[in-house]
């Protein structure tokens, strides 16, 4: 696995596999349905405490909090990708400049 793209593919594939299995369990089985109900109930109890402690800005639904978290994560991933692309672009130009130097007769 010396190819970084192959490692990225396998990481994404594995993450997708686990996310799909979790989604199937939560939405496709009776046990998952009861677990979703428990999560919703516990969220209702916890969100007031989180709002009072300042962790949450206000009483948001669980869906809003998760959507906000995913949006922040996506923005951070975009920043990292842009920084990585800029760094590799600079490195590529640096390598081109080094190869164009006059080396003598």
Image (cartoon, grey):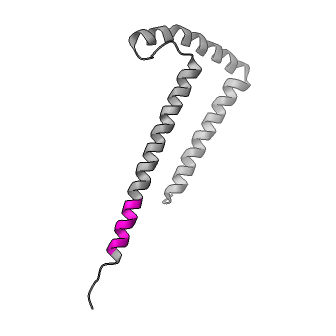
Q: Main secondary structure of the magenta part?
A: helix
Q: Which residues are magenta?
A: 89-98
Residue 47, given in percent of the width and then of the height, sits at 50, 12
Residue 26 found in image quarter: top right
Q: Quadrant of residue 20?
A: top right
The residue furthest left is: 104
Quadrant placement of the C terminus: bottom left
Q: Position of residue 39 (x, y in %)?
A: 59, 15
Residue placed at 50% from the left, 59% from the top? Answer: 3
**Which residue occupies 55% across, 25% down?**
66
26 with respect to 102 (left or right): right
Answer whether residue 40 is magenta in the image.
Answer: no
Residue 43, image x and y in percent?
55, 13
Q: Position of residue 85 (x, y in %)?
A: 44, 54
Residue at 51% across, 38% down: 74
Q: Is residue 44 above or below residue 72?
A: above
Q: Residue at 68% of width from left, 27% of height from top?
A: 25
In the visual, does 40 lie left or right of 76? right
Is 28 or 43 nearer to us in this picture?
43
Q: Does residue 73 lie above or below 35 as drawn?
A: below
Between 16 and 51, the residue placed more toward the observer is 51
Residue 95 part of the magenta-drawn span? yes
Decide: is 90 above or below 30. Answer: below
């Amino acid at each position: 696995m010396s190819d970084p793209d192959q490692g990225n593919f396998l990481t994404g594939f594995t993450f997708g596999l686990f996310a799909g299995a979790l989604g199937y369990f939560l939405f496709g089985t009776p046990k998952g349905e009861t677990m979703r109900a428990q999560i919703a109930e516990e969220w209702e109890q916890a969100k007031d405490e989180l709002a009072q402690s300042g962790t949450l800005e206000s009483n948001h639904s669980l869906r809003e909090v998760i959507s906000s978290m995913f949006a922040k994560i996506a923005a951070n991933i975009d920043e990292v990708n842009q920084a990585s692309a800029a760094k590799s672009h600079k490195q590529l130009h640096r390598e081109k400049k080094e190869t164009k130097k006059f080396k003598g007769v």
